[in-house]
Amino acid sequence: MLTPIFESHAHYDDEAFEKDRETLLSTMNENRIGTIINAGASIPSTQKGVDLAHQYPFLYAAVGIHPSETKELTDRDMEWLKQLAADPKVAAIGEIGLDYHWNEPAPNIQQHWFCRQLALARETKLPVIIHSREAAKDTLELMHTEHAETLTGVIHCYSYSKETARDYLNMGYYFGIGGVITFSNAKKLKEVVQYIPLEQILLETDSPYLAPVPYRGQRNCSLYLPIIAQAIADLKKIDVEEVITVTTRNAQQLFTKCKADMCRNGGTLG
């Protein structure tokens, strides 16, 4: 009996799936994908993610505003997110965080709304999905200031050093590992994956972005998760089935609202 694979981060609300979304999602179960977390990024994408979660029993939504989309946020938007968070198909607050790759919005704006959404996670008792790009120092400092160690969550698409990973491990956070682990130039990430315990890793694709080799540059989807699992297994010199079993269990522990779905039929696929 095979353990279903848990996709901890995808964006099936994205326009890249407009032409074949229904067809693609209908194939997930037969291809061993048991549960998917669809992460919010903007006001429209968050709403669409919740709508999709109600359409597909195996799909859950995370509600939140990506740092690049925070410039026009208001207190009313935070109240709207709070109301959405009460939905039974909402499993997390995310993706939220800091992204300094672009010049906009200004760092102080991103930081303000990151803090507000961390507070929302605390209020709603939901885990957080953290996005941090070229902002390692500020992300950690802000999370310490906001006592994010009292929350649960995952550092999505982890891209920093082993030293920074140690700080997140000490805070009890999981690490989202996706297609980048298959890239030949991902030496630093491969060292991190060898370092962190398997019990702190979640599988993710970030679909439609960051497809693994041999699909790099193409549209990503959850059907490529076995490739990511195999890459982790190779680095840790363990069987790929162990990677799938443990990462699925990790995701169930973090996203507790999803556990009932993943445990149907004994949590296995025949």
Image (cartoon, rainbow, N blue to C red):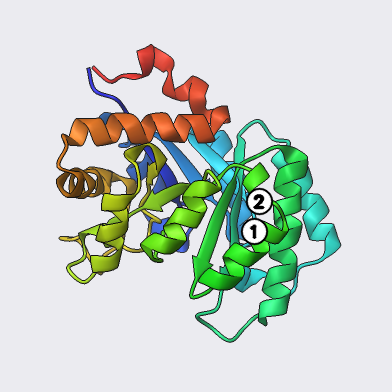
* Disc assigned to residue 56: none
Q: Answer whether labels 1 and 2 touch (C-beta < 8 Å).
A: yes
**Image quadrant where residue 114 sits:** bottom right
81 on left or right of 151: right
Picture residue at 33% right of the left edge, 31% below the top: 246
The amino acid marked with disc number 1 is: Met
Q: Is residue 73 above or below residue 169?
A: below
Q: Name which of mark 1 and mark 2 comes first in the sequence.
A: 1
Q: Secondary structure at mark 2?
A: helix
Extreme bottom residue here?
A: 103
Q: In this rendering, does residue 29 appear at all?
A: no
Residue 164, horizontal then vertical, whole percent: 46, 62
Residue under numbered circle 1? 143
Query: Closer to the camera, 98 or 84?
Result: 98
Picture residue at 52% right of the left edge, 66% below the top: 132
Residue under numbered circle 2? 148
Picture residue at 28% right of the left edge, 34% below the top: 244
From the image, which quarter does the C terminus lie in?
Answer: top left
Query: Closer to the camera, 159 or 63?
Result: 159
**Image quadrant where residue 185 sits:** bottom left
Q: Secondary structure at mark 1?
A: helix
